[in-house]
Image (cartoon, rainbow, N blue to C red):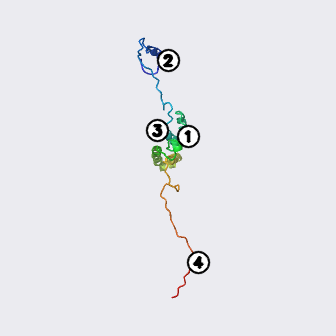
Amino acid sequence: MSMGIVSDNDFDSELDELTPLQNGDKKAIIQNINKGRGEGNVEVPEGLRKLIGEESAINGRASAIELANNFDVSPSSVSAYNKGSHSTATYEDRPDLGYINGRKQYIAKKARNRLVLALNSLTLDKINEAKAKDIAGVAKDMSAVIRNMEPEVLRNNNGSGGPTFIFYSPQFRSEGVFDVVHVKE
């Protein structure tokens, strides 16, 4: 029997040849293979979590939800995977954030290369021609892609990603606040 896709009639005729012999022996064992997560297992595999998170971060939530629907993954899980988390209950713990940021950096690097090509193509000759607007549009679009693909920076308490400087200055007090001591000389 050849391997591949066969008609139902061919399959049934081959299956009849594999029926049990009269003495109870079998020529072959036909076993259905369950694919997927398995019965009762609700955990989404790590590779799929990363793929859905990457899809959401790069191509948008709608695209990621469409992909997730193919694997019976909920839209709320898509939101968690986009943030690098494994579930909506553990947004603080984000083990896949490095992977998501790495994929964003890869796209941003490609956009930077295209931006440099577009800027290098913007010569005086092309500026004099009408196509300079098109090249400037490409440069603008690539810079927007870079800005959107910049990895998320964990921020400190004051909302910025950099160091915090605190300056203390003494308060001004008038002379009337202080006690006056008269001294004889």
Q: Residue at x 48, y 16 (%)?
A: 12
Question: Residue beneath label 4, please?
Answer: 176
Q: Residue flagged by tag 4: what amino acid is it?
A: Gly
Residue depicted at 53% across the width and 40% down the height? 78
> Disc number at residue 76?
1
Disc 2 residue type (three-letter): Asp
Marked residue nearer the N-terminal end (3 or 2) = 2
In this rendering, is residue 58 above or below 27?
below
Mark 2 sits on what residue? 8
- Residue of label 3: 46
Q: Is residue 69 visible?
A: yes
Q: What type is the residue that disc 1 sits on? A: Ser
Mark 3 or 2: in front is 3
When the figure is inspected, residue 54 is found, relative to residue 178, above or below; the finding is: above
Work out how far the residue at label 3 is from the one at label 1, CA to CA, in angstroms: 16 Å
**For the residues carrying marks 2 and 1, which lies nearer the camera in this image?**
1
Q: Earlier in the sequence, mark 3 or mark 1?
A: 3
* Secondary element at image label 3: helix
Q: Secondary structure at mark 4?
A: helix
What residue type is disc 3 on? Glu
